[in-house]
Amino acid sequence: MYPRAFRVDINPYECFGVRLPIVERMSQTRFITLEGGEGVGKSTLMTGLCEWLTQRGINVRQTREPGGTPIADAIRQLFKSPPGGEAITAEGEALLVSAARTQHVVNVIRPFLHSGNWVICDRFADSTRVYQGLFGGVPLNELEWLIKFSTAGLEPDLTFLLDCDVSLSAQRIGGRKSSGEIAPNERYDNAAQHVHDRLREGFRKVAGFYPSRFFILDASRSKDDVLRQACKELERRWQL
Ligand code: ATM
């Protein structure tokens, strides 16, 4: 099995076997990430989760990668539309997203968590493991070092992987693009189905490396159903 980053698991709801009261349980901030290919419904789930948590009195901030700070947003632009038609290597991509990530972690994610907010991030290091690692061919052990360096060891408490058949997500993207709701993504839009299949397989594989952190959602269900599955998992994990 792929080596799991070192981490001490402590049950935050118990102290010497005594269950903490609800207020203390809810004051514990959480870092949640959403992962999956394009068109699986990450943005819709983000909106639903933020509303659901806010209704429970939890301060929640949403963000995304690459991006989230002015420098990281500039890197996102460079990453998504490389200038001069120059092909970027997978190693170059890994370094770019890592540079964006360190800005994001230090200037946005950690300060939000420290000031009592939960943070939900659309994509994080698992996207690097999949896009630049399993798909792009950068050895995972090298990426792991880069991820640890750029995050200073910050790991999500929970990652929702939205998983569905590639033909369904392609259909959803096609609809949103023709209605002008989303801009075309030059990098993966025109890729053949087998590319998207490999990305999907990559996400499922990475989820297998971290079984206790990942929760796989069946993204072929309706958006209400997907949100229900996710909220149920939040309730189960953290007794919200
Ligand atoms: P969206 O935010 O529109 O999903 O685009 C971000 C792109 O960046 C996405 N490409 N597609 N599809 C995935 C890619 N990406 C990486 O390749 N590595 C990363 O580490 C991250 C965070 C994103």
Image (cartoon, grey):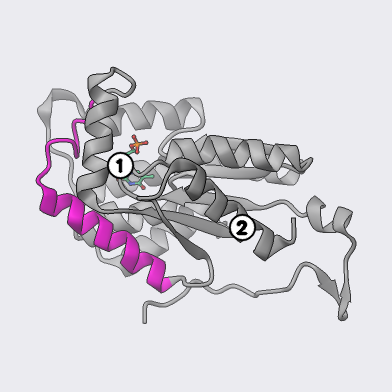
Residue 114 x %, y %: 73, 45
Left or right, 158 with respect to 41, comes to right
Instruction: Report the disc number at residue 38.
Output: 1
Q: Nearer the viewer, residue 208 or 126?
A: 208
Task: Tell me which residue sits at (79%, 40%) in the image.
Answer: 57
Amino acid residing under circle 1: Glu
Q: Is residue 175 above or below residue 195?
A: above
Instruction: Report the disc number at residue 232.
Output: 2
Task: Tell me which residue sits at (31%, 47%) in the image.
Answer: 37
Is 189 magenta? The answer is: yes
Badge 2: few (under 14), some or many (20 or more) residues near its Cα, within 10 Å?
Answer: few
Main SS category, magenta section: helix
Amino acid residing under circle 2: Lys
Q: Is mark 1 within 8 Å of ligand 1?
A: yes
Q: Is residue 6 visible?
A: yes
Is 137 magenta? The answer is: no
Magenta segment range?
184-209
Badge 1: few (under 14), some or many (20 or more) residues near its Cα, within 10 Å?
Answer: some
Task: Tell me which residue sits at (43%, 46%) in the image.
Answer: 123
Q: Is residue 232 above or below residue 181?
A: below
Left or right, 178 with respect to 107, comes to left
Left or right, 175 with respect to 225, comes to left
